[in-house]
Amino acid sequence: MAEVVRMPKMSDTMTEGVLAKWHVKVGDKVKSGDVLAEVETDKATMDLESYEEGVLLHIGVEEGKGVPIDAIIAVIGKEGEDFQAAIDAAGGTNGTAEKTEEKPAETSETPKTEEKKEEAPAQGGALSEDELTAKGITVIRMPLLSDTMTEGVIAEWHKKVGDKVKDDDVLADVETDKATMEVMGYATGTLLHIGVEKGAAAKVNGIIAIVGPEGTDVSGILAGGSAPAAKADSKEEAPKEEKQTSYADASAAAPVAESSSSDSRVKASPLAKKIAKDKGIDLAQVSGSAEGGRIIKKDIENYKPAAAPDKKESTAPATPAEKAAPAPLPQFIGEEKFTEKPVSQMRKVIAKRLSESLFTAPHFYLTMSIDMDKAIEARARINEYAPSKVSFNDLVLKATAIALKQHPVVNSSWLGDKIRYNEHVNIGVAVAVEDGLLVPVVRFADGKSLTRISAEVKDFAQKAKAKKLQPSDWEGSTFTISNLGMFGIDEFTAIINTPDSCILAVGGISQVPVVKNGAVVPGNVMKVTLSCDHRTVDGASGSAFLQTLKALLEEPVRLLA
């Protein structure tokens, strides 16, 4: 019988994998040990090998798609065999197929669907929005004019029931929690109904007006619409000439100069207003060519500013106000743009784990300055003889390993109902890669030489950047070091890599004046910050560990003892 291939769990933190690339196609013969595909996990891209022999009958996941662990991704069997029987026998399909099968189940009960449709208040009675539109009726609701708005107050109605309206006419001024803004109907017809009086408030999405053919009965529509809120007692009607105006269209949010007309507003289409704002054109200076002097797009495009009057010499001396007049600043119009990328598997897990660590483990931080003069001298001498160049990070790692053996509390792990005091020292080293952060582990670091530590760290860094690390490379740390000194960072705090109890954040070495033997002399100082989980480590325990680390780095000959 055909055998299914499932998404394996390739790391301790993996919850789903992405099929980066298939190396075989349906119909290919495969043997046990052949690489079927490359799977991108939260930490690396790894090869998925076949444990069966036969013909690849089915591929259940396309390249670039992610599925949870244990999901069926392929079927291998004899040529011509029914792969669907194997999928059914395995008790499921891949994640995509499961979703498509669920859709009929959701819509199979027709009466419930129709009942919901009839009860929905947003549809305007027994008619849906599409049916209302087909009849030429537009239900105008209170728009969401700001991200914090929950209701709006009708400050002023510019139309009354029975008036003819066009799609770009301003119907009302709405006072929100941030400004007074104009609401357009975006409908053509007769104003049949006003649902909110001037000075009253309506909830967002509540019916405030209805526009449609003259003589239309709106009682059925109102029966299913949302009712407006009670009259706002706390709001007093402000004088019309004092209210602030802005536009519901975010692209035309700035107030526009008003021209002399019957309603004291510039008559312009929304598109014309937007173009004028982008070009910095004052609408009061533009003549409209449409009916009633209304400004439209072509008026803005054909607008030419009037030439400035020629400056003539005047015998009259300039007044102080004229001398002090500031020069006009040139206008700059920028463009808002951005790029969005899907979150990678690695970044998803980093976000989840670090959030859990920061919000579940009570962090506290201890910072100490270390004199690195002798460490600099010792490193220079060691590199004269060492087969592999030793870095300052290697010195810090070795000193940390020795200090952890003397302070087992700092080398502990929080396991919920118990604390594990680790007698071995496995130090994770944070390595930055393109998609995030990986933490390969130097095992038994306290017993390894500086050159061996240096060689392992370099090898891990190369594997991490090539996405070739294996699960055994990043599992089992008891302590973590994160070093940003090479990026010019003086000091910082890091989030604990649970279940470890601590993480050491290492800054760069700075040349600063220091006091030695009562005199100010130049010195080389490095700051380190220990992030501690207060459930396992107290301030005194963390401080004692840092004192030992400081003593080892300030007398590096002790690292070789």
Image (cartoon, rainbow, N blue to C red):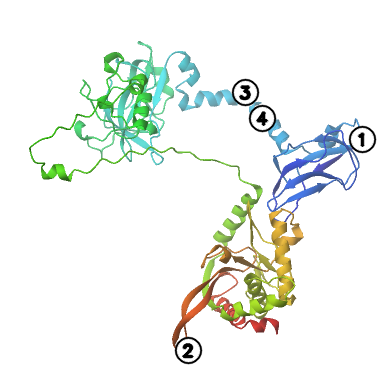
Question: Residue 110, labelled with which disc?
Answer: 3
Which residue carries the number 2 mark? 517
Q: CA distance from mark 1 to mark 4?
A: 32 Å
Q: What secondary structure is marked by label 2?
A: loop
Q: CA distance from mark 2 to mark 3?
A: 89 Å
Image: 68 above or below 412: above
Q: CA distance from mark 3 to mark 1?
A: 43 Å
Q: CA distance from mark 2 to mark 1?
A: 84 Å
What amino acid is at disc 2?
Answer: Asn
Tell me which label, 1 or 4, sits earlier in the chain: 1
Q: The N terminus lies in which quarter of the figure?
A: top right
Q: Position of residue 296 (x, y in %)?
A: 34, 20
Front of the two marks 1 and 4: 1
Tell me which label, 2 or 3, sits earlier in the chain: 3
Tell me which label, 3 or 1, sits earlier in the chain: 1
Front of the two marks 2 and 1: 2
Residue extending farthest bottom? 517
Which residue carries the number 1 mark? 78
Q: What secondary structure is marked by label 4?
A: helix
Which residue carries the number 4 mark? 103
Foreground residue, 187 or 333? 333
Q: Residues within 10 Å of mark 1 (few under 14, many from 20)?
A: some
Q: CA distance from mark 4 to mark 3?
A: 13 Å
